[in-house]
Image (spheres, grey):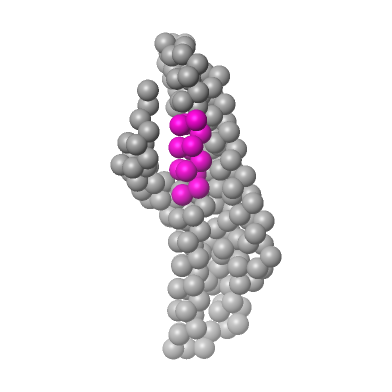
Amino acid sequence: MTNETKEIAVVEYNVFRHSLLRYAGYANEIGESFRYQFPRLVAPSYIVAFGYCFADSFVTGWSTWTHPQQGNKDQRSIWNDTVRATADTLLWQTLASVMIPGATINLIVKASRLAVRKSPMALPLLVSKWSPTLVGISSIPVIVHPIDDAVDVLLDITTRQWWPKQ
């Protein structure tokens, strides 16, 4: 692997999106899953998730500012690229990590609670109380990549078209 290839690999790898740290963005989904058992857990879980979103946005913006595209020495262009990259990352993370998954998990837990309540047979209290939470938590790994991919497509056909790279 040449130095140039190593540089490209480093730039393409994003610890916030390509490692287990990605699941920190889903902290609010844990909060949503436990909403009915521990309602006070919901707000702090959103703080962790938004902290993750802001951290990725800051790192992306900083990286864009300190490592401008090759041949791009114009300060105004560097500033524009930095603002665009930071805003794009913040929007992507807000949609893909907090808003869409939070609403999805909330619906899954609500639907599971309804199914438990409407069950034709009496379920033990432990099962009826905790199964919707477990269904919500277990659905997190299933929804991550489809939501990430859908948000990529959404931004590709909207905001990334409106504010193209220079």
Residue pictured at 61% horizontal, 54% vertical: 46
Q: Pick the residue in front: 65 or 103.
A: 65
Q: Is residue 29 above or below residue 109?
A: above
Q: Quadrant of residue 39?
A: bottom right
Magenta range: 83-95
Across and down, in percent, residue 87 comes to: 49, 37
Q: Pick the residue in front: 10 or 153.
A: 153
Give the total number of marks visible in the rendering.
0
Residue pictured at 57% horizontal, 26% vertical: 62
Q: Pick the residue in front: 160 or 47.
A: 160
Q: Is residue 30 above or below residue 23?
A: below
Side (left or right) of 1 relative to 23? left
Judged by its main secondary structure, the magenta piece is helix
Across and down, in percent, residue 84 comes to: 45, 31
Side (left or right) of 48 relative to 74? right
Q: Quadrant of residue 163?
A: top left
- Tell me, yes or no, if residue 42 can be seen here: yes
Q: Quadrant of residue 63?
A: top right
Report the quarter where the N terminus lies.
Answer: top left
- Tell me, yes or no, if residue 10 can be seen here: no
